[in-house]
Amino acid sequence: MLDNYKIILASGSPRRQQFFKDLDLEFEIRIKEIEEIYPNDLHAEAITNYLAQLKAAAFEGTLADHEVLVTSDTIVWLENKALGKPKDYTDAVQMLQALSANTHEVITSVCIKTKESEVVFFEKTKVTFAQLSLKSIHYYLKKYQPFDKAGAYGIQDWIGLTGISKIEGSYTNVVGLPTEKVYHYLTTHFLK
């Protein structure tokens, strides 16, 4: 449906790449390394909006006509604090202990950029964890090693099957990309 456009996905995430394949979108992967640092006064979606735009800014001046760049960023927002990817094993244990028997928000922002325009949008999903035992936390971290995931967990993993008691909102957002919003935007703005 997007034959006149070339979609560029600027993400090394295998989950985001798989979503694009599952959406039957032809795309190319281009990644530019950036330091994901944001101002301390930002909160919630302001953080992910900033980081998604920062990732897109790295491509400024390099996009050709009819290229559509998609960047995104996801955080876990718990008690007015952003949980990104864990620094190490101990940090991952602490994150999962904080999430245990608690409700948090998963916030993903997406930036879609062309030579002429840029739009940013976000999605929030509420996720509630059941009580997690320390034994189950260690089992999950050792077997699944979710150190590349915000909040140190993947809802699609074992922990999602055994430890999540409730979800309000988009499931794909928790995996890392609000696919319905991304697909809607791409097909309504670029389908001719």
Image (cartoon, rainbow, N blue to C red):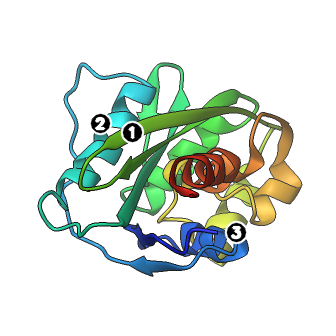
Q: State the residue lying farthest toward the front.
A: 192
According to the picture, the residue beneath numbered tag 3 turns out to be 23
Q: Measuring 39% from the left and 62% from the top, which residue is drawn there?
A: 68
According to the picture, the residue beneath numbered tag 2 turns out to be 50
> Mark 2 or mark 3: which comes first in sequence?
3
Indicate the position of residue 105 as horizontal and vertical percent values: 62, 31
The amino acid pointed to by label 3 is Leu
Compared to 109, does 7 lie above or below? Answer: below
Compared to 68, does 134 lie above or below? Answer: above
Quadrant into which the N terminus falls? bottom right
| Residue 46 shows up from this direction | yes
Indicate the position of residue 85 as horizontal and vertical percent values: 43, 54
Disc 1 or disc 2, which is closer to the eye? Answer: 1
According to the picture, the residue beneath numbered tag 1 turns out to be 119
Q: Residues within 10 Å of mark 1 (few under 14, many from 20)?
A: few
Asked if marks 1 and 3 touch (Cβ < 8 Å), the reply is no
Q: State the residue lying farthest toward the left.
A: 61
SS for dot 1: strand
Q: Measuring 41% from the left and 37% from the top, which residue is drawn there?
A: 120
> Mark 1 or mark 2: which comes first in sequence?
2
Indicate the position of residue 15 as horizontal and vertical percent values: 60, 69
Q: Is residue 119 found left or right of 41 in the rendered image?
A: right
Q: Measuring 70% from the left and 68% from the top, which residue is drawn there?
A: 23
Quadrant into which the C terminus falls? bottom right
Asked if marks 1 and 2 touch (Cβ < 8 Å), the reply is no
Q: Residues within 10 Å of mark 3 (few under 14, many from 20)?
A: few
SS for dot 2: helix
> Mark 1 or mark 3: which comes first in sequence?
3
The amino acid pointed to by label 2 is Tyr
